[in-house]
Amino acid sequence: MLFFHALLMATIVWLLNSVCPMWLKWSTYLGAPLISGLINGIILGDVAYGLQFGATVMMAFLGIAVVGNAVPSDVCLAGYVGVTMSMLAGVDPAVGLTVSATLGALGTIATPAYMTINSFWVHRADKYAEEGNTKGIFYMNALAPLVFTFFLYFIPSFICIYFGSPLLDSLLSILPAWITAALSTVGHILPALGLAMLMQLLFKNSLIPFLILGFAIAGYLKLGIIPIAIIGTALALMHYMYTRKAEV
Amino acid sequence: MEDKNMVIQDKNTIKLEKKDLKKSWLLWVTFGQACYNYERMQGLGFCHSMKPIIERLYPNDKQGRKEAMKRHLTYYNTENNWGASIAGIAASMEEEKRNGADIPDESINGVKTALMGPLAGIGDTITQSLVKTILLGIGIELALKGSILGPLIFLIGLSIYTLGVSYYSYFFGYRSGKASIIKILGSGIIREVTEALGVLGMMVLGALIVTNIGVTTPLTFVVSDMTVSMQGVLDSILPSLIPLTLFLLTYYLVNKGMKPIKIIGIMFVVGTIGSLLGILA
């Protein structure tokens, strides 16, 4: 069972870093922990644990969009390898978050590697272009990227999950309680980084009131994200209409 | 298509069919970033998306195919969904060029290069920091409540968004051409719309500080035989005071230009010490 589990997860990671359809990649890559939590939950027969786990890890990665090159942790590896390993070990989601983020940070070395090696196929494509061979472009773009990423993503992910999960399990079970408590606290703090990075993208002095408003509505009225997004939409429309009028 | 009068209308004219354009759009939105690399980024992906266009326009013309393919194998990088409009423009320029319009190679590449930056800027702001954030916010919240709809709404919602926006952008680019995109980019409407969307983004962000940063304090103290929880006291003043403080401190560090990996290191230290001293949990 663990063999097929590891096989499936490693294949997902492999495809997401090569030829997975881009429109599907947007959600499955950027939402990796959330999606992986569900898949793992189904495989392990505990969907509730999977949802809880995926959502908790996702919090840390919510703000960490692909913002330039400053990504501190690979969402895909953290999501599919980190979440799978920690869920197999059956740990508390907040501890799993820290484990996943650490694994993801290690995984960031893979991105520059594949981005460099892929240039190889572009040069092959140049040759096909010289021959007027349009099929060649298809092979180079849609199939060739599977080759190097197999070694860069599939094999390490498979090894981590298949051989690493039992190790992580025994490691986490012998850890003294104070370490797991500390890991869980770190897990509670980590989401602040993603949100701060997000705010750096969105920030404008004129938008500060809306940050306060969102904070107050969630903090005091305990409203969820959907109602807040609806109120936000109304305010956004007002902002658009009124600032436009002022210019005319 | 401002060069309409220059198109020579004879029986050698080849028009792109709707299905060629649909194929081209689908190739872009599927394989645009499959062979992502530092040297030319999405260059190969862009060339791949032009495959049905090139095959239609130069069916028995190896030289024409060769030149068109080489034209599109250059450095290219933009946001996938809004940037699809550039592929639409390129298709319409290729069509005009094939049918006799005087369009040098540099001018097609010039348009691609000129538009890819601004469209990446707009696309990244809207897709990454707004649509993705809101859908994830909803997804996380529902998943925490134990609803399977959480991950599903995110998966389906974002896929509909990417497919829909890229399809609309591609055909807008093809039909309206570069002039109208440049006009829109220069008109200030983009700035107004992104600022309005920023309103929504900031509100959701404010809410996420409350829901996503789960730090609390287990501190208690005794006041005249009564054990008082520090968290309770804080909650009565301002709920989520600790998460807000941590968020603002982190934002200060991010804004100062500190590397994210360094901030993670600091968080590990603060979290561990805070936990050991029994201040944070």
Image (cartoon, coloured by chain):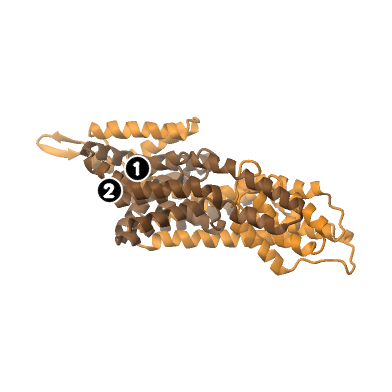
Chain colours: A brown, B orange
Chain letter of the residue carrying label 2: A
Decide which of A222, A89 is in the foreground and name it.
A89
Q: Quadrant of residue B81?
A: bottom right
Question: Which residue does the image show at 53% across and 56% down from the upper left?
Answer: A20
Q: Is B115 on the left or on the right of A235, as rendered?
A: right
Q: Are marks 2 and 1 in contact (CB under 8 Å)?
A: yes
Q: Position of residue B50 (x, y in %)?
A: 71, 57
Residue on which disc 1 sits: A99
Sequence-first disc among 2 and 1: 2
Asked if residue A225 shows in the view, the reply is: no
Q: Is B30 on the left or on the right of B240, as rendered?
A: right
Q: CA distance from mark 2 to mark 1?
A: 10 Å
Q: Quadrant of residue B14?
A: bottom right
Q: Position of residue A171 (x, y in %)?
A: 27, 41
Chain letter of the residue carrying label 1: A
Say if labels 2 and 1 share a chain.
yes
B217 is higher (above) or lower (below) than B55: above
B156 is higher (above) or lower (below) than A144: below
Decide which of B84, A138 is in the foreground and name it.
A138
Question: Which residue does the image show at 42% across and 42% down from the upper left?
Answer: A104
What amino acid type is highlighted by mark number 2?
Val
Residue on which disc 2 sits: A91
